[in-house]
């Protein structure tokens, strides 16, 4: 059995790491984005960076100094912003990913929030939300600009 590569030890992840994804950028850099539970009853998104890209077991990681990189957006429940996707590079060299989200505990549907970044550490939403009624409920879709 392999040892744990990173254990929760900071205020922003002390209540555990929930889910995430790993990305290999065109320059070979490997990093992981993950949802963490904080000591202030909220979920944030953090970035961890692989130290040695030659290690076939990917065992040595460090936390990004600027963690957390994403906070729960306004209008979203504090524990309703999760599961960062793998990052891909789009036109103009901008990195893109999507996040799962839910506005309130009464929402029946989740939706994704597309995000754009130039450096994989500072993310911004560049999208428009629009509601679609479905059988008396409202499902929110988001279209990127």
Image (cartoon, rainbow, N blue to C red):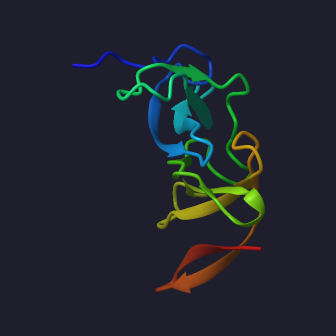
Quadrant location of the C terminus? bottom right
Q: x, y (%) of residue 116?
A: 72, 56
Residue ranking furthest to the left: 1
- Measuring from the top left, give residue 10's x and y in whole percent: 59, 16
Q: Compared to 145, does 125 lie above or below?
A: above
Q: Nearer the viewer, residue 126 or 134?
A: 126
Rendered residue at 56%/36% (across/down): 31
Q: 2 and 114: which one is in front?
A: 2
Q: Residue at x 46, y 25 (%)?
A: 16
Quadrant location of residue 51?
Answer: top right
> Is 20 left, or right, of 97 in this rendering?
left
Q: Residue at x 63, y 25 (%)?
A: 40
Please determine whether, in this image, residue 36 is positioned above or below residue 60.
below
Residue 66 vs 73, above or below: the answer is above
Residue at point 75%, 44% (across, down):
119
- Can you give x and y, in whole percent of width and height, for residue 19 in the image? 44, 40
Query: Where 14 falls versus 128 (above or below)?
Result: above
């Amino acid at each position: 059995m392999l040892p744990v590569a990173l254990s929760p030890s900071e205020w922003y992840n002390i209540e555990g790491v929930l889910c995430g994804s790993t990305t290999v950028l065109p320059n070979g850099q490997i990093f992981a984005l993950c949802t963490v539970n904080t000591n202030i009853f909220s979920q944030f998104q953090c970035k961890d960076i692989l130290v040695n890209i030659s290690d076939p077991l990917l065992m040595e990681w460090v936390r990004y100094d600027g963690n957390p990189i994403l906070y729960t957006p306004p209008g979203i429940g504090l524990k309703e912003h999760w599961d960062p996707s793998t990052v891909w590079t789009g036109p103009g060299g901008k990195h893109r990913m999507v996040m799962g989200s839910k506005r309130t505990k009464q929402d029946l549907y989740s939706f994704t929030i597309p995000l754009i970044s130039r450096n994989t550490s500072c993310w911004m939403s560049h999208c428009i939300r629009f509601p679609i009624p479905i059988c008396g409920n409202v499902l929110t879709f988001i279209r990127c600009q």
